Amino acid sequence: MAVKRPNVIGRIETLLDAQDDRTVGTSMRMPASLRDAAALAVEHLHVARSTTALTAEALRCRLEAIVLQAALDSHYRENPGARPSLGDLAVAAAELDGHPLAPRPQVLRRAAEEVVRSHPDADADDVLLWAEAQASVAG
Amino acid sequence: MTRVRTVVLDNEGVQALSSSTHPKHAQVIAHVQVVAHRKAKAIPLDILAPTAVRVEAGWDRRARSAALINHLRIADVPLDTPSADVAAELVVRLQVSVADAHLGATVASVADRGAVAIITSDPADMAAVSGPVPVTIVTI
């Protein structure tokens, strides 16, 4: 039986929010090289308590991103006017980071228009980098 | 300049996300979209709402009107015992609201994770309750 997409998203959210410390063994297969890389990162770079913890954190982070974007996409479908432009996103990113160009939104919007012409898939951070480089060159 | 690690919402930030007709809705949605893009790139970044701010903004997670904001992966920060102590000190010292004081306590509790940004319509009070933690104040 097919399950509706919103129901799946809601179920994933519920599971992500669950305060449940139980663990399960899985038969999940992964490339041996990836497993070895993770083990090295844990042992020598101390990026997590264990490779299991590292894997779980990465999986949680990815699922969080998926459900958040799904919620936003659903909102944009119902409210097309709410979808931010690349310029809007560049301004928002600059504001959140306290970027020196945040008080100059017109510069960021112009940079977004320039960047997207040659890089249609550019995101807000690409625009910030471009605008920063342009500002640096301009002195 | 360092990339933001934690975004904290004040009353106006919550209200802007709760209703698509709020005048600041599109602006704050853009901030959430930036968070979503960065999460997709595995950049750690959290959005938090102190529970006292939720109360002040009228965000009841059980309400149908909260359907959108409930899905934006905004974590509650409860007013637990240590936070209540910090918030009480802020109320006495600065004569701010309970919600603003809880927000200040929240900022103090997450400051060691990395840079903090506050989305607010009240930059002066936010700067006061956050001190001495350096925060980026995003005025909407």
Image: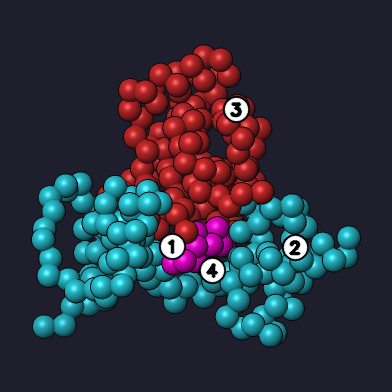
Chain colours: A cyan, B red
Marks 2 and 4, how far apart at CA:
27 Å
Question: In the rendered structure, does residue B31 fall within the stretch colored magenta?
Answer: yes
Q: Amino acid at mark 4?
A: Ala
**Residue A85, x across and y down, in percent:** 61, 72
Marks 4 and 3, how far apart at CA:
34 Å
Q: Which mark is residue B42?
A: 1
Chain letter belonging to callout 3: B
What secondary structure is the magenta-colored segment mainly?
helix
Which label sits in the foreground, 2 or 3? 2
Which label sits in the foreground, 2 or 4? 2
Marks 1 and 4, how far apart at CA:
25 Å
Left or right of B50? Residue A59 is left
Left or right of A83? Residue A116 is right
Q: Amino acid at mark 3?
A: Gly
Which stretch is magenta? B30-41
Quarter of the image for residue B49 reads top left
Residue ID at (54%, 24%) = B96
Residue under numbered circle 4: A82
Marks 2 and 3, how far apart at CA:
29 Å
Chain letter belonging to callout 4: A
Q: Amino acid at mark 2?
A: Glu
Of residues A40 and B50, the one drawn nearer to the viewer in this rendering:
A40
Quarter of the image for residue A84 reads bottom right
Label 1: few (<14), some (14–19) or many (≥20) C-alpha neighbours in 10 Å: some
Q: Amino acid at mark 1?
A: Ala
**Residue B121, x across and y down, in percent:** 61, 42
Can residue B13 be seen here? Answer: no
